[in-house]
């Protein structure tokens, strides 16, 4: 018994040996982000590991838009949110319809279309930025938030289609046949049987696309230039334009910017592990 | 209630022809079982009737109306799937009401039908539960309930009991049979289990390699199999079959098999020297002493008592055969015994074609 306890302790110790450095490695930048956010301007660059006089002053400045870099903070926050949520929803519409058509309706050539879409990932998104800029120019969408929304949906869609197709392939085929015999049209099948069963995957993919758009910098920077249109991410980049960047405000805004994704992730985490199909068919 | 008619039905998947021109009729209110080994095409045939599979050739008619180009939802049929195929996100009640809801049925009528079906199937306490909260047998009943609620012209069952354990299978078998006797709806039931087929069917269609081997009432197939395939497929344990040649000259007619064993024969079937398969059911063999007059000598290999009956594995010449008796014979492995046979109970088939030779 004792030996076993020792062995368990040994295993635990080994895990800790890997876990602790990994934890420090991940948390150190975040710690510094927080350190800056809760320090005054003078203290921030002091190199201390703990703020001597922790303050919420930075947050006040940010929330009240009291710095010229932050003149449109709330608007830009809204821009980020609007664009991210729209991209999430649009990606869901595109990817769910595609996955349903390919996986359940077995549309001819569906797999080819999916593979072609996935093929775009062979080219790094950064290389596609300029062609995308040109394309949006042709459509007259430059400096329009829809340019970014469409671009991000394009980038998120292939992976989303692929993931949703894999998920829908796992739904029992007999359910479709049963629904068909019960008198369901393809649209009713989609709405009444397919969507409810796909909910966990849909939440996961929606979150993925939303976070992808929320965190995007390059495309947002290229496609939007008006201060009132850009996302908060781009606005953060603009902080670095000056020689005397207000680091403590940059870090504070960064911290605020990082909170919604974390909240979204933790809210929907439980959906991402699905077990909804249990009991449908004998496995 | 309805009739179903298959006319020259063919089915190909690509270049593989899985159903080779099948014709038969199902009578009104009949419980018809399609049985055969896996890959014989029975499920495909059922799925074509259900409208889940394209018909390559021929016509299927329900109540004399050809349904080839009618969608399954408009064929007025309901199907019970092997895997139950219950909608996991709906309660038992919602599962059963789904088809009526899609048809925008009157809510009162919908509630009545569901209540009626759940009463027949004893599902009342479970109406608010989800399929994942039910046992296998209960799920199977919900699947049947979903079909009953529709009040269709024809019930289709696709191996509905295969997923259940042996005891539950026997219970559900009786339940389905009782259900049919109560509702009298025309039923097409697919199974690979010949015991299920024998116990449930009004008539059985035995299929093999996309063809019909024989159609008939269970005991008719058992007593008068048209060919060697049906003879061996129907009945458990299956019929003993020995290959030999018909001998008529010198004494009573018999079939002589390799090793010189002579099996008695009626005067009728087979011409002198014809190569035949000689079949006798395990229950039609009688034990006697080794030196009895006219008995076929054999040796006991294994004795398997099951309580109600005893199964003996025997060696006669080069053939092994099974004997089933209701008694409890006092014999042991290695004993020499004799076998007597009523020649009227013998089945003789042509070795080449497998066809039954007229007795």
Image (cartoon, rainbow, N blue to C red):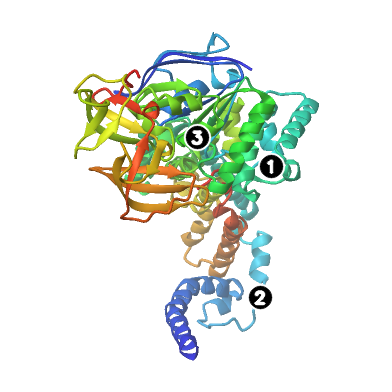
The x and y percentages for residue B284 are 41, 35
Compared with residue A50, is residue A283 higher up or lower down, i.e. above or below?
above
Q: Which callout, 1 or 2, points to the residue nearer the camera?
A: 1
The quadrant holding residue B65 is: top right
Report the chain holding disc 2: A
Residue under label 1: B91
**Residue B315 or residue B48, whichever sits in front:** B315
Which residue occupies 65% across, 23% down? B184
Q: Is residue B44 visible?
A: no
**Residue A271 or residue B137, whichever sits in front:** B137
Residue under label 3: A100
Which residue occupies 66% across, 34% down? B145
Describe residue A168's horizontal placement relative to residue B241 as left or right. Answer: right
Q: Marks 3/1: CA distance?
A: 24 Å
Report the chain holding disc 3: A
Residue under label 2: A55
The x and y percentages for residue B86 are 60, 39
Residue A231: which numbered mark, if any? Answer: none
Q: Which callout, 3 or 1, points to the residue nearer the camera?
A: 1
Q: Marks 2/3: CA distance?
A: 52 Å
Secondary element at tag 2: loop
Which residue occupies 64% across, 78% down? A54
- Within-10-Å neighbours for mark 2: few <14, some 14–19, many 20+: few
Secondary element at tag 1: loop
Q: Is residue A70 visible?
A: yes
Secondary element at tag 3: helix
Farthest residue, direction bottom:
A2
The x and y percentages for residue A187 are 58, 28
The quadrant holding residue B263 is: top left
- Within-10-Å neighbours for mark 1: few <14, some 14–19, many 20+: some
The quadrant holding residue B256 is: top left
């Amino acid at each position: 018994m004792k030996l076993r306890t020792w062995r368990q302790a040994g295993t635990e110790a080994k895990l800790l040996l890997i876990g602790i450095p990994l934890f420090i490695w991940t948390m150190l930048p975040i710690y510094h982000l927080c350190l800056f956010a809760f320090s005054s301007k003078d203290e921030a660059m002091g190199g201390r590991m703990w703020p001597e006089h922790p303050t919420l002053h930075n947050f006040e400045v940010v929330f009240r838009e009291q710095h010229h870099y932050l003149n449109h903070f709330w608007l830009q926050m809204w821009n980020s949110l609007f664009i991210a949520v729209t991209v999430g929803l649009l990606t869901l519409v595109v990817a769910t319809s595609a996955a349903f058509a390919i996986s359940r309706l077995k549309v001819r050539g569906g797999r080819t279309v999916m593979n072609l879409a996935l093929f775009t990932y062979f080219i790094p998104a950064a290389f596609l930025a300029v062609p995308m800029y040109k394309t949006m120019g042709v459509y007259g969408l430059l400096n329009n938030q829809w340019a970014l929304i469409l671009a991000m949906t394009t980038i998120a869609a292939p992976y989303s289609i692929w993931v949703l197709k894999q998920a829908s392939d796992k739904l029992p085929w007999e359910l479709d046949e049963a629904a068909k015999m019960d008198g369901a049209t393809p649209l009713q099948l989609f709405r009444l049987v397919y969507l409810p069963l796909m909910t966990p995957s849909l939440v996961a993919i929606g979150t993925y696309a939303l976070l992808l758009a929320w965190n995007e910098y390059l495309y947002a920077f290229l496609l939007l230039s008006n201060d009132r249109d850009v996302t908060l991410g781009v606005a953060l980049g603009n902080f670095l334009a000056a020689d005397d960047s207000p680091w403590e405000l940059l870090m504070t805004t960064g911290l605020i910017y990082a909170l919604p994704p974390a909240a979204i992730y933790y809210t929907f985490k439980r959906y991402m592990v699905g077990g909804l199909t249990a009991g449908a068919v004998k496995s | 209630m309805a009739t179903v008619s298959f006319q020259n039905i063919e089915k190909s998947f690509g270049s593989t022809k899985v159903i080779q021109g099948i014709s038969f009729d199902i009578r009104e209110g009949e419980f018809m079982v399609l049985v055969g080994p896996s890959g014989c095409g029975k499920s495909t045939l059922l799925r074509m009737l259900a409208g889940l599979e394209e018909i390559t050739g021929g016509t299927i008619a329900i109540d004399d109306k050809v349904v080839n180009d009618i969608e399954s939802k408009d064929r007025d049929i309901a199907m019970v799937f092997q895997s139950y195929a219950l909608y996991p996100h709906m309660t038992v009640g919602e599962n059963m009401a789904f088809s009526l809801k899609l048809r925008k049925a009157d809510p009162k009528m919908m509630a009545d039908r569901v209540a009626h079906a759940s009463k027949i199937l004893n599902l009342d306490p479970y109406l608010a539960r989800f399929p994942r909260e039910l046992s296998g047998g209960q799920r199977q009943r919900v699947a049947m309930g979903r079909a009953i609620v529709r009040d269709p012209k024809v019930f289709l069952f696709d191996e509905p009991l295969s997923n259940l354990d042996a005891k539950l299978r026997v219970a559900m078998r009786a339940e389905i049979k009782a259900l049919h006797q109560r509702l009298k709806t025309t039923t097409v039931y697919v199974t690979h289990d010949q015991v299920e087929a024998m116990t449930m069917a009004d008539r059985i269609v035995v299929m093999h390699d996309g063809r019909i081997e024989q159609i008939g009432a269970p005991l008719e197939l058992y007593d008068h199999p048209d060919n060697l395939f049906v003879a061996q497929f129907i009945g458990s344990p299956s019929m003993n079959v020995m290959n030999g040649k018909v001998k008529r000259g010198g004494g009573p007619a018999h079939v002589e098999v390799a090793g010189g064993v002579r099996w008695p024969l009626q005067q009728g079937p087979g011409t002198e020297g014809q190569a035949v398969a000689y079949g006798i059911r395990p229950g039609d063999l009688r034990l006697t002493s080794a030196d009895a007059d006219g008995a076929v000598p054999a040796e006991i290999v294994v004795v398997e008592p099951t309580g109600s009956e005893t199964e003996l594995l025997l060696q006669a010449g080069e053939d092994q055969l099974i004997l089933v008796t209701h008694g409890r014979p006092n014999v042991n492995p290695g004993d020499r015994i004799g076998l007597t046979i009523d020649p009227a109970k013998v089945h003789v088939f042509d070795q080449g074609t497998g066809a039954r030779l007229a007795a």
